[in-house]
């Protein structure tokens, strides 16, 4: 019997959707709280934001701040400002291969610890992999009680295998949790996020629909379940939930967007339709119902008899078997002429003509 893995209860998403929108658009508190609630309802999550984007009124915008993590530069006054604003989580930036763990960073870490903030330190992966950098990072984590080290790759310089090896090594060397924050500049955001989770990260960055070039929230959820074999509860109606968030942010979803695109379960080719009606796993890695979508058999120039029979059954239309081929011929000619698939209304008319 195949072993079923279980997600570590500490695994969460570091949502970037809210922070991305806050930094670029003015939205009223009700809209912001609605976005936050929709995302919270889908998975365990913390919200990464910048302190400056809140205009000094975080509590007025969100009521509760326990799951929000402001990112600040390594300056003691910025750490103090986050504390005064009511935050209990903190992301400290500034550690890279050029500066290392600078005196400014250690001073900021000391301030964060004195305020009782749960601090995550963002570091460049090349600093973390260097022998000297790793030693300094380990010492800082031990001395200042760093909660997690965030391996950042904003320019997508790492590939999944190299990243996985780096995370495995860091997990063995550091006395704290690990996170990974990636970018989709080279189309590897989802792959890298899943690789980091497989290597032992407790958290990865994500954004609904992949806005801002972050790993798509919904793809990571499905990847954890179907590629990593983890026990994951896929949010009911995840496609509609993501659509609501995107509507509120003013972004649209491409119809072919993996997991949540409205037409990802559309099939036209006769071979595809014949296969999907016999065994949907031939062309669909998961069922439409799992994400709140439905299968759509498109009738057009590439359709075959299997498509015609499926559409007849779907529309509850009876037709003699010998007439189905006549309908197929009419469908193909019409779709070529209008340079578009045949609508259900047009299909009904073609069936009527063939039955005469």
Image (spheres, helix red, strand yellow):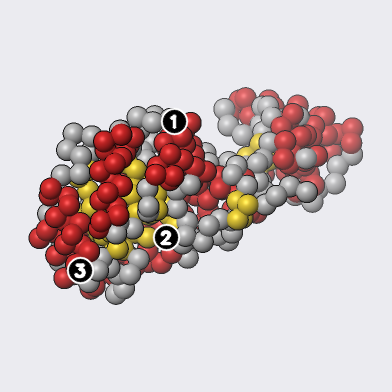
Q: Secondary structure at mark 3?
A: loop
Q: Quadrant of residue 130?
A: top left
Q: Quadrant of residue 355?
A: top right
Q: Secondary structure at mark 1?
A: helix
The answer to whether marks 2 and 1 mark residues whose Cβ atoms lie closer than 8 Å is no
Res 201 seen here: yes
Is residue 329 shown left or right of residue 151?
A: right
Q: Secondary structure at mark 2?
A: strand
Q: Quadrant of the C terminus?
A: top right
Label 2, residues with CA under 10 Å away: few <14, some 14-19, many ≥20: many
Residue 337: percent from left, percent from top: 61, 25
Specify the label residue 162 is tagged with.
Answer: 1
Q: Quadrant of residue 343?
A: top right
Specify the label residue 115 is tagged with.
Answer: 3
Label whose residue precedes the other's in the sequence (3 or 1)? 3
Query: Gap in Å between the C-alphas at discs 3 and 1?
Result: 37 Å
Res 247 seen here: no
Label whose residue precedes the other's in the sequence (2 or 1)? 2
Residue at image location 30% in from the left, 63% down from the top: 118
Residue at image location 48% in from the left, 31% down from the top: 161
Nearer the camera: disc 2 or disc 1:
1
Query: Gap in Å between the C-alphas at discs 2 and 1?
Result: 26 Å
Q: Nearer the viewer, residue 161 or 347?
A: 161
Residue located beneath label 2 in the image? 45
Specify the label residue 269 is tagged with.
Answer: none
Label 1, residues with CA under 10 Å away: few <14, some 14-19, many ≥20: few
Residue at image location 72% in from the left, 36% down from the top: 282
């Amino acid at each position: 019997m195949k072993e079923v893995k279980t997600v570590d209860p500490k695994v969460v998403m570091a949502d970037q959707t809210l922070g991305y929108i806050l930094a670029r658009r003015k939205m009223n508190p009700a809209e912001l709280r609605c976005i936050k609630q929709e995302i919270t309802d889908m998975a365990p999550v913390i919200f990464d934001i910048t302190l400056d984007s809140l205009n000094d009124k975080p509590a007025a915008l969100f009521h509760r701040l326990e799951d929000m993590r402001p990112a600040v530069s390594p300056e003691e006054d910025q750490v103090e400002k986050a504390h005064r604003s009511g935050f209990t989580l903190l992301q400290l930036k500034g550690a890279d291969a050029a500066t290392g763990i600078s005196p400014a960073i250690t001073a900021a870490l000391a301030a964060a610890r004195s305020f009782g903030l749960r601090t995550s330190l963002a570091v460049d992966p090349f600093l973390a992999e260097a022998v000297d950098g790793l030693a300094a990072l380990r010492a800082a984590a031990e001395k200042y009680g760093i909660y997690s080290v965030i391996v950042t790759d904003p320019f997508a310089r790492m590939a999944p295998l190299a990243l996985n090896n780096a995370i495995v090594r860091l997990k063995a060397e550091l006395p704290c949790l690990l996170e990974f924050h990636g970018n989709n500049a080279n189309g590897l955001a989802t792959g890298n996020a899943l690789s980091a989770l497989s290597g032992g990260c407790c958290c990865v960055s994500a954004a609904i629909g992949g806005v801002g070039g972050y790993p798509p929230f919904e793809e990571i959820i499905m990847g954890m379940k179907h590629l990593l074999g983890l026990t994951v509860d896929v949010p009911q109606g995840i496609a509609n939930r993501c659509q609501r968030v995107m509507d509120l942010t003013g972004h649209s979803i491409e119809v072919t967007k993996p997991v949540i695109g409205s037409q990802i379960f559309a099939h036209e080719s006769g071979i595809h339709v014949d296969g999907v009606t016999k065994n949907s796993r031939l062309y669909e890695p998961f069922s439409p119902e799992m994400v709140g979508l439905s299968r759509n058999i498109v009738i057009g120039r590439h359709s075959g008899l299997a498509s015609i029979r499926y559409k007849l059954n779907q529309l509850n239309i009876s037709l003699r078997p010998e007439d189905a081929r006549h309908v197929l011929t009419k469908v193909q000619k019409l779709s070529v002429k209008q340079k578009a698939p045949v609508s259900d209304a047009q299909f009904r008319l073609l069936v009527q003509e063939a039955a005469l």
